Amino acid sequence: MLNVRVIAILVLATGLVACPAFAASASWDYTLGADYSAGRYGAAIDTQVTDLSLGARVQKDAFRLEVALPFVTLKGPGELVSGTPVAVTGESALRRSSVGDLSLTGSWMVIASETRAPSIELTGTIKAPTAPAGIGTARADYALGANIYQTLTPTLWLFGSLGYSWLTDSPTYVLSNGVAVSAALIYRPDERRETGVSLAYRQPAAEGLKSQISLSPYISQRLNDRVGISFYASAGLTDASPRLGAGVALKFSR
């Protein structure tokens, strides 16, 4: 989901901005997540999406590489387009499950500011079509973007992102490339606790669909030096967005 990706960035981002001096050796972490969402997306009934995801991430100096693979259960007349459901006319509320689409993201922190100036990160993502048709589009997608982190106070940050996605047409839809924008306010009272709220927007993924807009609060807590947990919820502000959603993620650092 659009805001789930934003929250995943945020949970990592404030640590990088708060401690911009990069470690001499590579750091690894692994993520186990569960997410649920429901929405009509212009259809007469809900499409419900549940996914369990595994992820890995390595950071070396200003560079980061991430990979994630979900297992998706989808019920309803929709299919996933770059992780977000769209309604498929004439489809029934069939329940189906499968491995989802593999995503690979590379990031470069171009400016890691140690002052009040913003930090800037460039990103690129490839979505590999590992999910079958009916779960995903069975096509590859690509995205480029930039993330900006602005320190307001020692405990308060602003986050913004701007990206563009290239979507390959599915057997069902002629898809539209488009802009995605997000913004968030983040409060981090100490190194173990963090909370925030994000607003995410994406242009329509296909002709005849509405833009996706969703609002998501989240909270993250480090349980010890190696394990952290995050909870989040989401509410859609258009018919093309999930009406509601919630999730949890466990992060294990090495």
Image (cartoon, rainbow, N blue to C red):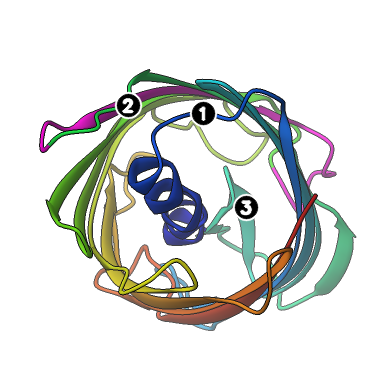
Residue 59 visible in the picture: yes
User: How far apart are labels 1 and 3 at the CA level?
Assistant: 36 Å
**Which tag, 1 or 2, sits closer to the chain's start?**
1
Residue 237 counted in the magenta span: no
Quadrant in the picture for residue 75: bottom right
Percent x, y of residue 25: 71, 25
Label 2, residues with CA under 10 Å away: few <14, some 14-19, many ≥20? many
Q: Horizontally, is 155 left or right of 15 in the view? A: left
Disc 1: which residue: 22
Disc 3: which residue: 80
Q: Horizontally, is 244 left or right of 153 in the view? A: right
Q: Amino acid at mark 2?
A: Ala
Viewer-nearest residue: 68 or 121? 121
Viewer-nearest residue: 120 or 47? 120
Q: Are marks 1 and 2 in contact (CB under 8 Å)?
A: yes
Percent x, y of residue 140: 67, 25
Percent x, y of residue 230: 56, 75
